[in-house]
Structure formats: structure tokens, C-alpha cells
Amino acid sequence: MHDNVLITWNPFIFLGLFCYLTSAAASTSPMADADWSDLPKELLNMISERIDIEIDMIRFRSVCSNWRRSSSVPNHHLNLTINFPLHKSLSNSTITSFCCLSKRSIFLIKPQPPQKQQQTLIRPWLVRITQNSSGKKKRFDPFLSHHSSSTSFYLPRAIDFHKLSVLHLGADFITNELAFHMLLPQKVISIGKHSLFLGILKNCTPQLVLFTCGNQPWKWIPEISTTSGDICVFKGRFYAADKFCRTVMIGPDSTVQMVAEHVVHGGDRKLLVESDGELLLVDIYESLDFGINVFRFHEKEKKWVKLMNLGDRVLFLGEGCSFSASASDLCVSKGNCIVFIDDSVSAYWMQGGNGVYHLDQGRVSPVSRYHEYFNLFSPPDWILES
């Protein structure tokens, strides 16, 4: 009977045990004298399979080599890499090849200050980290599109995430494919432990497809066009909006449910982003008179409601992934603004696609003019000196 005790444990017990073990293993207290590396492989594997947050998985695997070996990343549901099926054409369901997509996670990291210095502001670092299927190699990708690849800085060989305050803000999937295949994904998002993905194909008219890992062909979603539109995950579900703000929810069986009607007199480009538990739609006018309207999704009334102020929130918008954070977490003076992190949106006053739009001012400026935002994307001194 005792042999089955571990199998029937509540997942919250596993989570609590994980938090206790990782903190104890990384601690300098007398409790650290215990040899945590000798825990049974079966127990470690069962704990790792219940970890749903990538930074927790990184911390778990960084404790020691035994913990790392006991948590097999290729078999884990965090989907660090996926094989995206390529077809001969949109009308042909025969898979001819695959392209490999790597998950790139977005973190806001900063050191944990001593208790007596809780009010001290330490500049955090907004960084994208890419891992391969083995979970060993990590690449730190610069955010701003105009940053040169030759930007000179040297990162420490190892970064101890146990000693850092870390917020996971989002993720995207990228490919190293050099060929401009018309059916390569333009954007990919995922939900759940069963590797369900929604992607936008690079085509003359972008096509929306649903697919799972394995050799299964993707399913075309013809009910909505993502030309000048966007897709995102909200409350564990897929959402897609077209250029008229018409919005649908897409089920795992490829069913499509209308959740919001169009918005009259919209702009040229739509981007979706989750912010503090709400789904927002950013409507962008890419003309010389650059302008932005922000709408909040009202689930019960099934419509978009215009917002006049974002409060403490800062939105970061890009083609592959959009996310948000609070001004207090970012250690900046105020929120109520939008930062463009790539060239997915064009405006005369932007610098290589990177700009800051303040809703209270109604204008966009190069991000380099606002040092408190610009500096978020470069490694701070406390990282370089660690």
C-alpha cells in the first residue's frame, strides 16, 4: 500500500515539495548540508512533470546534475522545440518536410535586495532566452531590432536564477530557417500540456492553421483572415482578430466561435495582448498622422470597449509576441504607454521600428529618447559584474 502513496499525492503537495527542495538546495543555511542530490530519480521526475512554469524548470534543473538528468526536457510538456509540418501547398495535406521552431521566453529579472533595502530601485533586465531541446544551451537575444549583433558586452558564464527575482512575461517561437518558404510560420502560439499550436503562415494572404506535435497535418482555419490582424492566448484559449477587429475563439477541435463584432472606423493594423488578466486590442493607424486606440475585451457583452488610459501598465508590442508589465515592476516612472520592440509597425518617427507611444500625449517617439525604457533592454551592471 505504501508503494502507491507518491502516485496519489495531490499536485499542490508536489509543488510545495519542489519549492522547499529548491530553496533548501540553494540555501547557505545548515539545511543545505543535507545531500539533496540523492533523492530518488522517480520522485524527481514526478515533481518535474508537474512544473508548468519555465523559470521553475530552469531552477529545478540547476540544482545539481542528478536533478537535471531526472527531468528529461525532450519529454517535458514545456515545448522548448517543436517540429512545424510543411506542406506542398495550402490545398495539399501531404507533409513534405518540417522546420524546427525553438521556444524563446521573455523574462524580467532583477536581484532580490536585502530586506533593509526594499525601497532601493535596481534597474531590471528585460531579456529573451532561447533553449534547445536538451535544455542546456541558452541564448540571450537582444530585443530592439536596430541593435547591432556586434553590440559589445560579456555575460557571465552562469547566471544563478535562485538569487534573482524573475517574472515570466511571455514567449514566442522562432526558426533558424534561411529559406523564405511561403508556408513557414509568421507567428506561433501554444496552449496546454498536449502541444496544441496555432500559427499564421507566411503567405500572400496570411493563413491561420491549427496543429499538434507529431506527424499530423495542420488544419486550416478559413473562417477568419489574419491579414493586418493577430492571434494570442487568453485564459488558456486561442483568440484571433482580423483587421476589422472581428474576433473569434478557436477550440482544440478547430471550431470557431465569434466572441466580438467589428469596430467601426478602425486603423490599419491590429495587435492583441494580455494585460493584467484582461485581453486588449491595439488598433494602429500607420499613416503619417500615426495614432493608436486601445480596446478592452468585454466577455459578457461580446464587444470591444475603448480605453482612455492604461494606468500603471506598459504594453510591449511585436510581430512574434506582445506582452505587458507594470511600471513598478519595470522600475520606470510611469505606465500608460506602448513600446514597439520590432519593425512590425512602421511610423516615420520610429527608429528601426522601435518607438514609445504615450497615450496621454498621443504621439510616438524613438525609444532611444526615453532612457528608462531603452535601458531595460541592455544588461545592467549587476549582471555584467556577477
Image (spheres, rainbow, N blue to C red):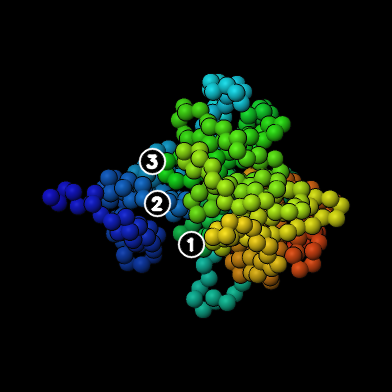
Name the front one of labels 1 and 3: 3
Nearest the camera: 88 or 54?
A: 88
Residue 44 - label: none
User: Marks 2 and 3, how far apart in space?
Assistant: 12 Å
What is the total number of numbered labels drawn onto the structure image?
3
User: Marks 2 and 1, how far apart in space?
Assistant: 19 Å
Q: Secondary structure at mark 2?
A: loop
- Relative image position of residue 122 (x, y in whole percent): 61, 68
Q: Dividing the image into 4 quarters, which one contains the C terminus? A: bottom right
Q: Is residue 22 visible?
A: yes
Residue type at mark 2? Ile
Nearest the camera: 93 or 33?
A: 93
Nearest the camera: 173 or 381?
A: 173
Q: Is residue 244 above or below residue 223?
A: below
Locate residue 320 relative to residue 18 in the image: left or right: right
Work out whether mark 2 precedes mark 1 in sequence or the reverse, and give the earlier one.
2
Residue type at mark 3? Ser
Quarter of the image for residue 366 reads bottom right
For mark 3, what is the residue?
Answer: 72
User: Marks 1 and 3, how far apart in space?
Assistant: 24 Å
Residue plotted at (63% across, 34% down): 207
For mark 2, what is the residue?
Answer: 51
Locate residue 331 relative to residue 371 in the image: left or right: left
For mark 1, what is the residue?
Answer: 163
Name the front one of labels 2 and 1: 2
Q: Is residue 372 above or below residue 248?
A: below
